[in-house]
Image: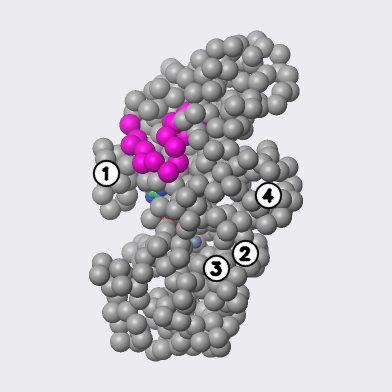
Amino acid sequence: MSGIRLYDTAAKAKRDFIPRDPKNITVYVCGPTVYARAHIGNFRPAITFDLLVRLLRHSHGDGAVTYARNITDIEDKIMARAAETGRDLADITAEAERWYLEDAAALNVLPPDIAPHATDHIDEMISMMTALIEAGHAYAAEGHVLFDVTSDAKYGAVSHRTLDDMVAGSRVEVAPYKKNPHDFVMWKPSADDQAGWPSPWGRGRPGWHLECSAMIAKHLGTTIDIHGGGQDLVFPHHENEAAQSRCTHAGAPLANYWLHNGFLSVDAEKMSKSLGNVVTIESLLSAGHRGETIRLAMLTAHYRQPLDWTDALLTQAKTVLDRWYRVLEGAPVLTAEPDAELVAALANDLGTPAAIARLGVLAGTGDAAVLRASANLLGLLENDPAEWREGGADADDDIDALIAERAAAKAARDFATADRIRNDLAARGIILEDGPDGTIWRRE
Ligand code: AMP
Ligand code: ZN
């Protein structure tokens, strides 16, 4: 027994984590829909589940965990962006995926083992719909394929909503081709000028829920150990994933544990593009914050609690990291096991507030080796202490990345972006000099 306990949304309780096979633990997290730069709220699940995977690897062994985080690269928001800008869908998704991975790397989020793309799994989605239709769980109508929620006695098991609740709080789309207003779309028709794939029901595209179900079945199998995502995904996304997968696989559950992170807000309002209160990792890095500072700030709140994002949070995190790095500076780099009390805090449903408090105690003892090993489990204190004090190698990497981005903007004749990057860097005291061999930079 690893002693790990996790809050399972479906059970509405903390449960001992018992893997199906302790040598082959499977974790799936719904990844980004790639059409724009993600905001820091979108990175809360990335950091939360990165921490979970680090903990599972610590307790069960590096090779014992397979972590998949998908890329949703076909979705109506992406198509709307393509229509608005006249750009190719594939260009938009490739660019936004690159941004996401750059930002995740800056936050020391390890790449998942598998990063499946929805558009590479259309055949698997078609097979799943075919099986569901044959089994009487789905039907085709007017170029759509719909899941019949009344065919699934367990529908509602993840979110604890009953069909009656859903009717009461209804915002579902009533459409003539639906037998029941709560039936959800697995496949929908595409107009000639829209992205689409051939299918037995005509040219169309998949619904978002189906994408995850098909990718999980293909890469991780029928039943996985842990399924994660943000709280907003509990219903309908995860409920619908669970229904499709269960009904395809003769009642076998999609996941044994369902984990959901709380929301990140700004001034008590949810961070979202439509509210215009979005902060990006890029903008924080440009303002001189380091990825590790952002990561620690994010981990100060327990993952299920709401987190209100403020500048003070970053300032505090920076002060704490400065203090911890001072303990490491000059100390020999020795290997050690992470502190048992810290591991126990994390094993208790990723108790990061207690784990961070424990790091403070360890820093106070001056035992650099245990402090480093313990912080590393949270993806912290992995930088060189002298570089941290001087402003950090990763701060310089980000300058190089911005210079490359400015060169790309200039090449694309996007001078507004190029000037903005130069001005942002100037505000940090970084002066750019363009020369025949490219751009070099120096501090003021
Ligand atoms: P999306 O790209 O919109 O599908 O979102 C990717 C992930 O970010 C999902 O797991 C969402 O639940 C999560 N998410 C979106 N906004 C926030 C927020 N403000 N705080 C925490 N998680 C969020
Ligand atoms: Zn999903």
Q: Earlier in the sequence, mark 4 or mark 3?
A: 4
Residue 300 lies in magenta, yes or no? Answer: yes
For image coordinates 40% across by 22% down, the residue present is 316
User: Looking at this view, is 93 or 421 the one in front?
Assistant: 93
Q: Earlier in the sequence, mark 3 or mark 2?
A: 3
For image coordinates 56% across by 35% down, the residue present is 346
Disc marking residue 65: 4
User: Could you tell whether 354 is left or right of 232 in the image?
Assistant: right
The residue tagged 2 is: 223
Give the Cα distance between marks 3 and 2.
11 Å
For image coordinates 67% across by 12% down, the residue present is 331
User: Quick check: can you spot residue 105?
Assistant: no
Q: Amino acid at mark 3?
A: Ser
Q: Amino acid at mark 1?
A: Glu
Callout 2 crowding tier (Cα within 10 Å): few <14, some 14–19, many ≥20: some
User: Could you tell whether 230 is left or right of 24 in the image?
Assistant: left
Tell whether circle 3 marks a residue whose Cβ is less than 8 angstroms from ligand 2.
no
Residue 50 lies in magenta, yes or no? Answer: no
User: Against 226, is 244 above or below?
Assistant: below
- Point out residue 136 in the picture as x, y percentages from the top left corner: 51, 87
The residue tagged 3 is: 213
Q: Amino acid at mark 2?
A: Thr
- In the image, the segment drawn in magenta is 292-310
Give the Cα distance between marks 1 and 2.
36 Å
Give the Cα distance between marks 4 and 2.
14 Å
User: Against 152, is 390 above or below?
Assistant: above
Quadrant where the image shows the C terminus: top left
Q: Earlier in the sequence, mark 4 or mark 1?
A: 4
Q: Secondary structure at mark 1?
A: strand
Callout 3 crowding tier (Cα within 10 Å): few <14, some 14–19, many ≥20: many
Disc marking residue 269: 1
Q: Amino acid at mark 4?
A: Val
